[in-house]
Amino acid sequence: MHVVIMGCGRVGSSLATALEAAGHSVAIIDQSREAFRRLGPNFKGRTVAGVGFDRDTLTEAGIDEADAFAAVSNGDNSNILAARVARETYGVKNVVARIYDPGRAEIYQRLGIPTVATVLWTSDQILRRLLPQGSQSEWRDASGKIELCQMHIDSSWYGRPVSLIENVMPARVAFITRLGEGLIPNEHTVLQDGDLVHLIVEESQKSIVEVALSHSPEDAA
């Protein structure tokens, strides 16, 4: 893949080096040439000084051959504008924009522009550690109707098959995080103490599922 990144801050430089290490072709854009120092001496990709939504700059970065585009500068407006140009003008299929304002991120998400809301993501991560009960949204579709949520389960579910969750409530188990590793469950998977359960659920049903998982399986049935 050829990936174009706008913004060579901590996120952009980390993305660029990780993608290059994985064998991908990378071009990174930043208005300041000094920012490219973050990439280190071993970076072999293209570095382009300029504005990330300027056509000449994008052309120099290889946008015409790009398979993916990430806008991760420190400006919401610049990121969303660059993401729209990459998708709508150049037809790049995989586009994502980092947005600091979670309210705006949700609006753009519903317009079909994939976004990562930095503040919202950070808040979710902290809340999961402060308030393990209930759920925290990890992903939402563009319509806002379907969510991927990490949900707290009562200890009485431990030792029971994962399939029991789907049998007694309107939700699908997407995966489990066990001892820090992701696990896609099958019909033989049994819930263990410490498991983090990630469910696909309709937003309108989320509160029902939260309540059910906070009680024993017998009460949820």
Image (spheres, rainbow, N blue to C red):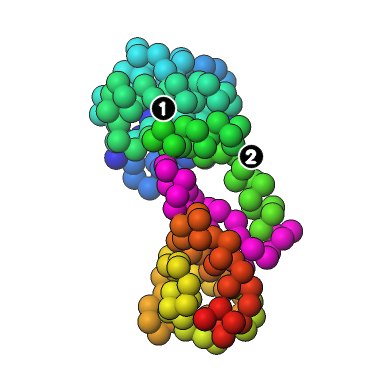
Q: Where on the picture, by quarter, is residue 174?
A: bottom left
Residue sitting at x 42%, y 18%: 53
Q: Quadrant of the N terminus?
A: top left
Between 155 and 33, the one nearer to me in the picture: 155
Closer to the N terminus: mark 1 or mark 2? 1
Q: Quadrant of residue 154?
A: bottom right
Packing grade of label 1 (10 A; few <14, some 14-19, many >=20) is many
Mark yes or no: residue 92 visible: yes
Residue 53 is tagged as: none
The answer to whether one can see residue 99 in this image is: no
Residue 191: % across, % down: 53, 80
Q: Residues within 10 Å of mark 2 (few under 14, many from 20)?
A: few
| Residue 146 part of the magenta segment | yes
Left or right of 100? Residue 52 is left
Q: Which residue is mark 1?
A: 83
Residue at disc 2, secondary structure: helix
Position of 191 with respect to 65 (left or right) is: right
Q: State the mark number for residue 119.
A: 2
Give, as a single range, the part of the protein colored magenta: 129-152
* Residue shown at 64% from the left, 46% from the top: 122
Q: Amino acid at mark 2?
A: Val
Q: Amino acid at mark 1?
A: Ala
Give the camera-side residue of 149 and 31: 149
Q: Residue at x 40, y 13 (%)?
A: 54
Circle 1 — which element?
Answer: helix
Residue 43, given in percent of the width and then of the height, sits at 44, 35
Q: Position of residue 71 (x, y in %)?
A: 46, 29
